Image: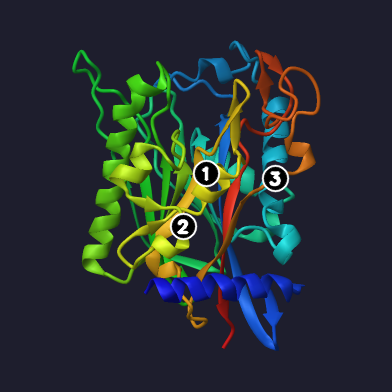
Amino acid sequence: MNHTFSNRSRFFSFLLISFITTINSFSQEGIQYKVRTVAFYNLENLFDTINDPKTFDDDRTPLGKDKWTSSRYKEKLKNLSKALSEIGYKTINSSPDIIGVCEVENIQVLQDLVKESSLQNKNYGIIHFDSPDERGIDVALLYKKEVFSPTSFKSHRLLLFKENEFRDYTRDQLIVGGLLDDEEFYFIVNHWPSRSGGEARSKPNRLAAAKLNKRIIDSVLKLNVNAKIISMGDFNDDPIDDSLKKVLKTKGKIRQVTLESLYNPMEKLYKKGEGSLAYRDKWNVFDQIFFTGNLISNTKESYSFWKAGIFISDYLITDFGKYKGYPKRTYSGGTYTGGYSDHFPVYVYLIKKVK
């Protein structure tokens, strides 16, 4: 089995040399391949301007600390829609087919987002549930309706408790099943508990999130051992941390992958020194996409993994000051900077032979 994966790696190295871009496809030796992009983006506090009395969203209101006005909200939507529309575009001349997002306040901000000029002609559908997070932020899935047809969706609650035994409310994990073109796929969108209070002190919460993610994956595989599952999100952990390596047992090298394991291509990027966010001059890859081993195969007849990346464009980067080189965020040190997010988006390409 490992021999097969090794051959596949060489096969795709050759494909890169012969790459020709078309819309959502490329050809090699006269064979046409269809390409689909799966992306994830932490939208960094995409809030509307309305005060929700049930959540701690006061800062993101016109009278709040951030002075979050309609004009700032509209600029944020314009910026994020531009970034989303360009993920993977230089390679396949198309915006992502599947997009997981987090740090969104409600369904309305997502509806406003997909109506922006950069996205409005893409015909994105939205799957969203309200999470019990105290700030009111949720995860969601956007999908191109002509590409993906949802058949099932469920929001799984992560139950956490503080030292005083009171609930620690956080984000749910969303799973969506459906047909990507004519193939069954499952997409899980995550936003695991933060490192607030310190990495070590908050670690148990992320281990609990990893266990929930594993239960979701195992429950799908119990019904269909051949299910193709892609889990994505802001995990607030790096690919080498215990939540990924010890609980989910993700593999970072293709030759280690079996049909029973999960492959995390972001581990290679992390070890190369790349990052999706920075803190105190240290780069992390908290934003990750990993998936079941059956997406690593030599077959050309169904979708399989091609490559992964972190989407970084000049306009997404802070170009001056203390945080030069960091992702260009909306606020920096409490000052409005009109940026995008404190994270870079991540993505993977899936390909298959066109019949």
Q: Between disc 2 and disc 1, whose residue precedes?
A: 1
Residue assigned mark 1: 101
Which sits earlier in the primary sequence, circle 1 or circle 3? Answer: 3
Query: Which comes before the other along the chain, label 2 or label 3?
Result: 3
**Residue at 37%, 51% in the rendered image:** 250
Q: How is the image coloured?
A: rainbow
Q: Secondary structure at mark 1?
A: strand
Q: Is residue 97 above or below residue 289?
A: below
The reply to whether residue 335 is in sight is yes
Quarter of the image for residue 28 reads bottom right
Q: Amino acid at mark 1?
A: Val
Q: Are marks 2 and 1 in contact (CB under 8 Å)?
A: no
Q: Is residue 228 left or right of residue 57?
A: left
The residue lying at 30 percent from left, 64 percent from top is 260
The quadrant of the picture occupied by the C terminus is bottom right
The residue that disc 2 covers is 253
> Which disc, if any, is residue 83?
3
The amino acid marked with disc number 2 is Lys
Mark 2–mark 1 distance (CA, rounded to whole Å): 26 Å
Closer to us: mark 2 or mark 1? 2
Percent x, y of residue 112: 62, 42
Q: Give how far apart the Cα atoms at labels 2 and 3 are.
A: 29 Å
Q: Secondary structure at mark 3?
A: helix
- Give x and y (percent) for residue 244: 37, 43
Percent position (x, y) of residue 336?
Answer: 71, 19
Q: Quadrant of the N terminus?
A: bottom left
Amino acid type, callout 3:
Ala
Question: Secondary structure beneath disc 2?
Answer: loop
**For the point 50% across and 46% down, which residue is it?**
288
Q: Nearer the viewer, residue 353 or 280?
A: 280
